[in-house]
Image: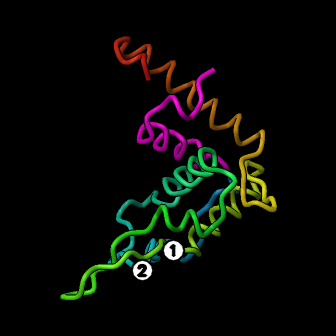
Amino acid sequence: MTTVYDIPADMFIRQAAEELKQNPQIQPPDWAGFAKTGVHKEMPPENEDWWYVRTASVFRRVYIDGPVGTQRIRSIYGGKRNRGPAPSQFRRGSGSVIRKILQQLEAAGYVAHAAEGRMVTAAGRSFLDNIANGLKARTAEVAPGLAKY
């Protein structure tokens, strides 16, 4: 069985975002159109579907790193804060975005809240592994030489 570990992250996240769009419980909140993804960013994301892409990415990180908490995921999505002539400093990503995404994934039944942090449920693991399996099958059909992924 193919798992998330066997597929390149960029291919996997794009496909998972498309699949998550079909789920009615995963919807961007009203403020997502003009929210920055962290204090280190100057502007909101340009991609209109950024919420689904970030949800797929967070879902993948919980699968790989879980159980994890909001603070650790914020560190993953952080970056350098430009302070002008002063040296740049690391700042974590937006906690509100991460929290809301995790709450939506919990409502969909893909992630569960445990004492150690959030972890992927059996339904979530099946959802992600089915996406990985479909991507591997499609890659084998289109380019047999790339079947190693």
Picture quadrant where residue 71 is located: bottom right
Viewed as shown, does residue 3 lie left or right of 92? Answer: right
Predominant secondary structure, magenta span: helix
- Who comes first in sequence, dot 2 or dot 1? 2
Image quadrant where one finds the C terminus: top left
Q: What are the residue bounds of the magenta stretch?
A: 1-23
- For the residue pair 146 and 75, the one nearer the viewer reads as 75
Contact (CB < 8 A) between labels 2 and 1?
yes
Rendering coords of residue 6 (x, y %): 51, 28
Image quadrant where one finds the N terminus: top right
Rendering coords of residue 86 (x, y %): 23, 88
Badge 2 density bin: few <14, some 14–19, many ≥20, Cα 10 Å: some
Please report the residue visible at 77 percent of the width from the left and 45 percent of the height from the top.
121
- Spatial separation of the CA atoms under disc 2 and disc 1: 7 Å
The residue pinned by badge 2 equals: 39
Q: Mark 1 is on which residue type? A: Ser
The residue pinned by badge 1 equals: 94
Please report the residue visible at 62 percent of the width from the left and 46 percent of the height from the top.
22
Rendering coords of residue 132 (x, y %): 56, 30
Rendered image coloring scheme: rainbow
Farthest residue, direction right: 115
